């Protein structure tokens, strides 16, 4: 029994040393790896900031370059925004105003 116990203990000792060496190597590699740091709140903008940016962008729409029907709709929507804020616009209204700010082909 003792004859079989000694090789098992030796195997466990060698295996344990191998695992310890592997962890030490991994720890050194992880410590040497460059760290990626993100800017704080880089993915988040408050609804107030988004609304302010949208108002500024929509305020720069050149009404003279639009079709008269679109001019009337842009005026109506901008007057709603001025009276009650950006939150009163529906998703379709926002998309419409965003489309009016994009440069059009042939214009």
Image (spheres, rainbow, N blue to C red):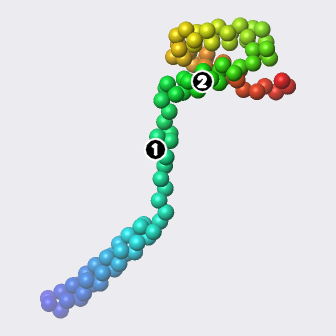
Local secondary structure at mark 1: loop
Judge whether 79 appears above or below 94 on screen: above
Q: CA distance from mark 1 to mark 2?
A: 23 Å
Image coords of residue 20 (percent x, y):
31, 76
Left or right, 6 with respect to 29, comes to left
Residue 54 shows which numbered tag? 2
> Who's the residue at 80% across and 17% down the image?
65
The numbered dot on residue 40 is 1
Q: For numbered disc 2, what is the local secondary structure? A: helix
On screen, residue 18 above or below 32: below
Picture residue at 40% right of the left edge, 72% below the top: 28
Q: Is residue 25 left or right of residue 97?
A: left
Is 56 on the left-hand or right-hand side of 4?
right
The residue closer to the viewer here, 62 or 44, is 62
1 or 2: tag closer to the N-terminus: 1
Residue at 79% from the left image edge and 14% from the top image edge:
64
Asked whether the beta carbons under mark 1 and mark 2 sit within 8 Å of each other, the answer is no
């Amino acid at each position: 029994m003792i004859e079989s116990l000694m090789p098992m203990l030796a195997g466990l000792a060698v295996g344990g040393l191998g695992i310890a060496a592997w962890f030490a190597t991994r720890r050194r590699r992880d410590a040497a790896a460059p760290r990626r740091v993100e800017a704080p709140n880089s993915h988040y903008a408050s609804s107030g900031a988004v609304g302010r940016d949208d108002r500024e962008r929509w305020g720069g729409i050149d009404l003279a370059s639009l079709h008269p029907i679109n001019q009337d709709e842009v005026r109506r929507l901008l007057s709603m925004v001025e009276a009650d804020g950006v939150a009163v616009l529906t998703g379709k209204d926002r998309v419409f105003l965003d489309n009016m700010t994009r440069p059009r082909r042939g214009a």
